[in-house]
Structure formats: structure tokens, C-alpha cells
Amino acid sequence: MAPALSQTPAATQPSAAQNAAPADTPSTGTDIFLMAGSDFDRPGLLPRANLNIGVGHTFAFLKKDPLGDELTFAYTYENAGTHGFLHTNLGEHSEQLGIMKNFNLPKTTVVTGYTWLQTGITTYTGNARLQNHLDTGVSLGAIVHLSLHSSIWLQETYSKVVTVPWYTTSSAGYTYSF
């Protein structure tokens, strides 16, 4: 018969320090994400598809960096046409590098927040010639943690392409972390 917990010798009971994870241990190493959203920047302010896929990796040496600790690479397709939601002949294809900063929200471990700064090249297609332009994006978001490896991201992005005024994109996505 096993002894009751109160009868177990103190030397075999793990201490609180042994159970606690170190404070600087990153919660994830690599994230793969898929996001779908909608822009409101085209003529008539009608919604247009904004589809994003990317990968990010957390680096321990960036943990104390105020801008972020996760470097990202993402590809985005946006419908740049004047009609239709998902696709028209006019498209916008972006490749972006970014830095993301994850932060805890008070009184919850299920939801965390993040900021994400991105810059890259946007290519407009569907015209007689391709047009490449510099673009930037600033995102603020929340992560709903479903499990150790799965989460849902909700974000609002403010973007600027050189030839287009600032516009917003609201997105939701799935992330797998390993």
C-alpha cells in the first residue's frame, strides 16, 4: 500500500522551484501561421480578400529587445480589383520580413497579446507590367491558446504601400507552434 501524501518523506516531494519553469524559457520556438482577413482600402471601401501564410521563429537572444523576440517571414495575397471578394485579375502579392513581440495580459494565461512590425515588397499584377513597391505594416493582436501547440490569432493591421493611402486589415488565423 502506498503511503498517504502526508506520510511521504519530504526528500521525495518536488519543491515548488523544481515544478516552476524558468521565467526566460520561450513558450514556442517556431510558429507556422495561416490567416484570412479583409481589407477596406479599394475603391468604394468594399471588403477584399487578404490571405497570409508565414513562419516565425523566437530567438532567445532577442528576449529583452523592446521591438520583439520573434523574426517572421510572410507571403500575402490581396485582391486589388474593383469587384469580387476573393480574386480578380488585379492582385497584390507581398513578401514581408517582420519582428513580433508577444506579451502577457493581466489575469489570464489563455489569451496573450502581440505587436508585429513588418516591411517588404508588394507586387501589383494584372496590369501591362508588374509594379513593385515598398510596403510596411503595423499589427496589434490577441492569441487565444487552444493547446500547447495550437492557437487562434485575431489581429488588426495598419498597412502602407507607397502608392496607396494607409488602410486596415482585420484578420483571424490559425497557428501551429513547435
Image (spheres, rainbow, N blue to C red):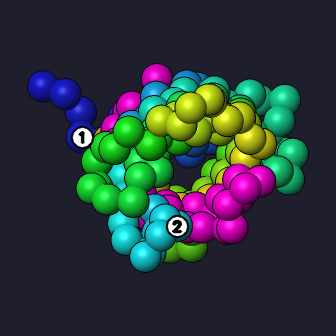
Expressed as whole percent of the image width and height from the top left, the position of residue 107 reads: 50, 73
Expressed as whole percent of the image width and height from the top left, the position of residue 138 reads: 69, 58
Q: Residues within 10 Å of mark 2 (few under 14, many from 20)?
A: some
Q: Main secondary structure of the magenta part?
A: strand
Q: Is residue 166 left or right of residue 173?
A: right
Q: Which residue is mark 2?
A: 41
Q: Nearer the viewer, residue 139 or 144?
A: 139
Looking at the rendered structure, the secondary structure element under dot 1 is loop
Q: Residues within 10 Å of mark 1 (few under 14, many from 20)?
A: few
Looking at the rendered structure, the secondary structure element under dot 2 is loop
Q: Is residue 169 magenta?
A: yes
Highlighted magenta segment, given as a residue range? 149-178
Residue 85 visible in this rendered orientation of the protein: yes
Q: Which residue is at a point 71% across and 35% down the rendered structure image?
A: 132
Expressed as whole percent of the image width and height from the top left, the position of residue 1 reads: 12, 25
Q: Which residue is mark 1?
A: 4
Location of residue 69 with respect to 107 vertically, above or below: above
Residue 52 visible in this rendered orientation of the protein: no
